[in-house]
Image: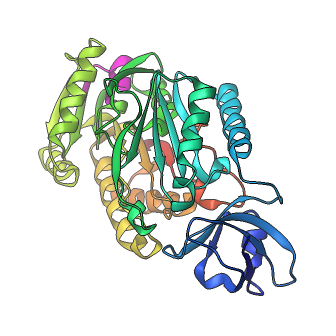
């Protein structure tokens, strides 16, 4: 096994629990290896600090699997997956949930989502791709799904020197599956939906809508397949407007509304959210509750400034079209929009909108997407529930 030495001064973050070693942190490599192989990591004092897989194609040169000198084999992955599954069984309804959340479950590069009786899997790095067959065997043994589908049609794999692909790993089966989320039926398209098929990370935040939407006029911007919109209608909103720029996404909103007999309460609007918020403001349209759940505006630190402006604009406009005392549920799934920066943006927007915010609740991603110490990237989703006061 090759031995990788870390430069003096570069070891602190790694020893504090961060699972990545960057290419510019390595001082020397002793021994030979192939991309995807397991290597040992030592600090500049020649002290063992971890074991993980290496890939010269990636700026993240090594992803750490363990801090122990243990063999990386089927038993290793079984123990990791069992621990992840046991945790989910304690904290969430496992009928549909994230089973494995990559580095936050100490299996870097592996994502596994469970939708009813079926699993959707992503192997996002070369090192974990090499163990995919064993991982699929373990998932089949532990969870006994009726089918497993591979959603490796993501560009990040190309940075690892891997091809994009998708298809059945156990099946075939109908990849359109109806799941229950907080007692609400939602149609999930495992084959063609976003990421693994559906965003499970907002499940608890959608449930948190309940106290605020009774008899309310609600706007769900960036609705996607209608998760927040359907919940708002189910929890007693009198009228819900669901806006998205994707025609396909809005077709799913209609299907999900019908699945729950809520089609009479939900209006779908095909539009760019930035444009329609301006239009609503110009027309004097008002809402009692507005939900903003945009896609990630910021996928790198360098994009933060532009993302900040985008988040501020939609939040400012939303504040201006809320009725006095209305509620704004604002989300960001951009990791680099750190919680303190997100809060500052909301305060800036409120100042410019001449509104006062009452912060009701600060929320994050669902419990099956765990946030762990030492790995700041595991905290990515922020959700602020606010009352907007004139």
Left or right position of 141 against 246: right
Q: Nearer the viewer, residue 68 or 301?
A: 68
Q: Can you give x and y, in whole percent of width and height, for residue 215 in the image?
A: 34, 19
Q: Say whether residue 185 is visible.
A: yes
Q: Is residue 264 left or right of residue 383?
A: left
User: Could you tell me which residue is drawn at 66 percent across and 38 percent down?
Assistant: 81
Q: Is residue 373 above or below residue 197?
A: below
Question: Which x, y percent locates residue 258?
Answer: 23, 16
Indicate the quadrant where residue 10 lies.
bottom right
**Residue drawn where x is 54% and y is 55% of the image:** 130
Left/right of residue 92 with respect to residue 301 in the rendered view: right
Asked if residue 236 lies in the magenta stretch, the reply is yes
Among the 4 quarters of the image, the one containing residue 313 = bottom left
Please identify the residue farthest to the top as the structure is shown: 261
Query: Is residue 340 or residue 152 the one in the foreground?
Result: 152
Please report the residue visible at 51 percent of the width from the left and 49 percent of the height from the top.
381
**Mark count:** 0
Query: Which of these two is toward me, 175 or 131?
Result: 131
What residue range appears in magenta? Answer: 229-240
Q: Would residue 371 appear left or right of 312 to someone viewing this image?
A: right
- Give the vertical position of 268 relative to 62 (above or below): above
In which quadrant will I find the N terminus?
bottom right
Q: Is residue 220 above or below residue 41?
A: above
The residue depicted at 45 percent of the width and 29 percent of the height is 209
* Residue 236 visible, this angle: no
Figure check: 89 above or below 108: above
- Colour style of the rendered protein structure: rainbow
Closer-to-camera residue (141/99): 141
Residue 254 found in image quarter: top left
Q: Is residue 327 magenta?
A: no
Residue 101 at x, y percent in the picture: 58, 45
Give the percent coordinates (x, y) of residue 140. Answer: 56, 29
């Amino acid at each position: 096994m090759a031995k990788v030495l870390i430069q003096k001064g570069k070891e602190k973050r790694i020893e504090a629990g961060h699972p990545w070693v960057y290419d510019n942190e390595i001082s020397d490599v002793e021994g030979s290896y192939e991309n995807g192989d397991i290597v040992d990591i030592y600090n500049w004092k020649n002290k063992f600090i971890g074991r993980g897989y290496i890939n010269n194609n990636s700026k993240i040169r090594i992803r750490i699997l363990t801090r122990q000198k243990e063999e990386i084999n089927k038993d290793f992955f079984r123990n990791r997956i069992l621990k992840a599954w046991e945790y989910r069984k304690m904290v969430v309804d496992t009928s549909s949930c994230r089973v494995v959340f990559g580095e936050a479950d100490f299996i870097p590069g592996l994502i596994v989502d469970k939708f009813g009786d079926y699993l959707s899997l992503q192997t996002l790095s070369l090192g974990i791709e090499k163990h995919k067959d064993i991982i699929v065997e373990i998932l089949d043994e532990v969870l006994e799904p009726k089918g497993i589908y591979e959603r490796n049609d993501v560009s990040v794999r190309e940075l690892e020197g891997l091809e994009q692909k998708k298809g059945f790993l156990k099946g075939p089966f109908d990849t359109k599956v109806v799941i229950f989320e907080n007692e609400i039926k939602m149609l999930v398209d495992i084959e063609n939906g976003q990421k693994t098929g559906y965003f499970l990370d907002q499940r608890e935040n959608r449930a948190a809508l309940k106290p605020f939407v009774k008899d309310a006029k609600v706007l769900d911007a960036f609705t996607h397949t209608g998760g927040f919109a359907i919940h708002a209608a189910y929890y007693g909103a009198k009228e819900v407007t669901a806006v998205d720029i994707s025609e396909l996404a809005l077709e799913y909103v209609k299907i999900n509304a019908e699945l729950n007999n809520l089609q009479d309460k939900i209006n779908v609007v095909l539009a760019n959210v930035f444009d329609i918020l301006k239009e609503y403001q110009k027309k004097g349209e008002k809402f009692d509750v507005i939900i903003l759940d945009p896609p990630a505006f910021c996928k790198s630190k360098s994009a933060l400034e532009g993302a900040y402006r985008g988040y501020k604009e939609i939040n400012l406009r939303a504040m201006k079209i809320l009725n006095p005392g209305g509620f704004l549920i604002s989300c960001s799934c951009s990791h680099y929009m750190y919680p303190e920066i997100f809060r500052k943006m909301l305060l800036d927007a409120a100042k410019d909108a001449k509104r006062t915010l009452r912060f009701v609740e600060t929320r994050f991603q669902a419990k099956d997407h765990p946030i762990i110490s030492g790995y700041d990237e595991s905290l990515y989703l922020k959700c602020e529930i606010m009352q907007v006061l004139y």
